Amino acid sequence: MEYLKAIDLSFDPRMQISELVVDAYYDLVKHFKKDAQITRVLAQSLLLEYFYVATENGEVASIIACKKDKPPPVKLDKKIFVKHLGLIMGNIAYPIVQKHMVEHRYPFELSTDTGSIEIVATAPKYRGKGIAQGLAEHVMDGLSYENYVLEVVDTNVGAIRLYEKLDFKEVMRTNAPKNAGFNHFVYMKKELSNV
């Protein structure tokens, strides 16, 4: 398994990364019933400089995005949503995805030495093999942040276990919106200076 920044790959990983993002955010995008089109929309919206990938034989096995601030490493364009999803569905999907992926913020202030871990996902055939953990360790070892934060939903028990293995500690919970399919957003932090 090779760990690299997405922009350093010898191939364009956008579609593979986008497939993993759609899978990770499936509860958000399943209502559009157009997985292939949503995948193309997000592929064109990725800011690859913030993505790190684990690859094997030209296949993206796992992804992590890490930034200095909360907005995910995507830049959404309403015209692209309309082009791939049609006028009506594009105009419905754009504000929903914008709200949940771009406008959502941490409920606390982030210091300048804090990196925000975003959009962690692993392809189904690579799950349970420690690849996401290895990629996360690689990313955090290679960046110069003193602290890392992330947000996960309370029902994603597997992800919470992974983050606990990486020494993240829960610092806060907030209530999820009604009918979200989960109860709380869980905020976790890792302080390298105390490790």
Image (tube, grey):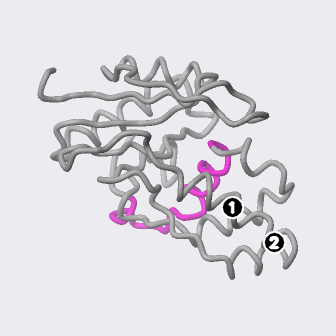
Q: Is residue 14 magenta?
A: yes
Q: Residues within 10 Å of mark 1 (few under 14, many from 20)?
A: many
Q: Which residues are magenta?
A: 6-24
Q: Nearer the viewer, residue 103 or 13?
A: 103
Give the labeled residue for mark 2: 85
Q: Residue at x 55, y 31 (%)?
A: 185
* Figure disc tally: 2
Q: Position of residue 137 (x, y in %)?
A: 29, 33
Give the labeled residue for mark 1: 39
Q: Quick check: marks 1 and 2 in contact, CB under 8 Å?
A: no
Q: Position of residue 13 (x, y in %)?
A: 51, 62
Quick one: quadrant of the N terminus? top left
First along the sequence among labels 1 and 2: 1
Q: Quadrant of residue 45?
A: bottom right
Q: Nearer the viewer, residue 55 or 173?
A: 173
Q: Quadrant of residue 101?
A: bottom right
Magenta region, mostly helix, strand or loop?
helix
Q: Position of residue 191 (x, y in %)?
A: 21, 28
Q: Mark 2: which secondary structure?
A: helix
Q: Residue at x 22, y 45 (%)?
A: 111
Q: Nearer the viewer, mark 1 or mark 2?
A: 2
Against 71, residue 145 (above or below) is above
Q: CA distance from mark 1 to mark 2?
A: 11 Å
Q: Residue at x 50, y 46 (%)?
A: 119
